Amino acid sequence: MEPCTLSTYIFLGLAGFFAGFVDSIAGGGGLIALPAILTTGIPPHLALGTNKLQGSFGTLTATFNYRRKGLVSLHDTLSGVFYTAVGAGIGTLTIQHLSPAFLRHVIPSLLVAAFIYMLLSPEVGTDERKKQLLPPGLFYCLAGLILGFYDGFFGPGAGSFWMVAFVFLAGMALTKATAHTKVMNFTSNIVALAFFIRAGQVLFTVGLVMGAGQMLGALAGSNLVVLKGVRFVRWFLLAVIAATIARLIVITYF
């Protein structure tokens, strides 16, 4: 089923723009896009697949803009792309057989911990740390498999988790972490999308309309990150994490 009114497509296009804008800065665009799709009456299984299609446009646009600005080298992220793709594939297949209910209870707690830590540690992510907690190869293996799996299996907050992982475990500054997060988000989005297309759970017209909005929003947001720098990203990330926590608590307990 595809929405048939012009006003509905305009609404979804605008939702895509704002989702792309937010997602390109701090992740969490799905908190805007997915509810917008559901409010049009599209069934949940089609909404999830369509959300992956429209989200892929935004993450791809942000990735190439960050690369053009020199914040990310695609060559340096190849191992992360591989492990994230593997994790996302396994997660997307798993969700077809298991309920994600147990994750819904764990994820809010983890996000609350990350939120409190970042709120009380204003110096985190202000610059590159000389000492990384994990070497790049091990970091990408663990983070790629775990967060790729999570994004394919459940999804909300995946971008914020990547941001936190890049800052705390890989020692990146927030602006660089933002750029690298988009590469991983695009990877898990496109892998999950392939499985949803195979299952016939994607509305292409809706996805393309929202995808156009996503591209414009991602371009605007990623340019703003470059202009405003770390302090802007930090507060934006805190706001998105708080919204993610609230959203997950609502869908888990109410």
Image: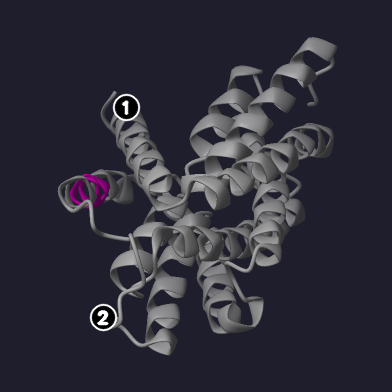
Q: Nearer the viewer, residue 172 or 38?
A: 172
* Screen quadrant of the C terminus: top left
Q: Amino acid at mark 2?
A: Leu
Q: Mark 2 falls on what kind of element?
A: loop
- Residue 220 found in image quarter: top right
Give the colouring mode of the picture. Answer: one colour
Q: Predominant secondary structure in magenta? A: helix
Report the residue marked by disc 1. Answer: 250
Question: Residue pushed farthest front?
Answer: 227
Q: Mark 1 falls on what kind of element?
A: helix
Residue range of the region highlighted in magenta in the rendering: 109-115
Q: x%, y% of residue 133?
A: 26, 80
In the image, is residue 110 part of the stretch drawn in magenta? yes
What is the tally of numbered marks visible in this picture?
A: 2
Q: Residue at x 57, y 78 (%)?
A: 77
Q: Amino acid at mark 1?
A: Val
Q: Residue at x 50, y 71 (%)?
A: 87
Label 2 close to label 1 by CB (< 8 Å): no
Q: Nearer the viewer, residue 225 or 88?
A: 225
Q: Nearer the viewer, residue 225 or 143?
A: 225
Q: x%, y% of residue 154?
A: 45, 50
Q: x%, y% of residue 44?
A: 58, 32
Residue 143 versus residue 28 in the image, above or below: below
Is residue 97 visible in this depiction of the protein?
no
Of the two numbered discs 2 and 1 on the same chain, state the one appearing first in sequence. 2
Is residue 166 visible in this depiction of the protein?
yes
Q: Between tags 2 and 1, which lies in front?
A: 2
Q: x%, y% of residue 248?
A: 34, 36
Residue 23 versus residue 10 in the image, above or below: below
| Measured Cα–Cα span from mark 2 to mark 1 | 34 Å
Report the residue marked by disc 2. Answer: 133
Q: Nearer the viewer, residue 128 or 149?
A: 128
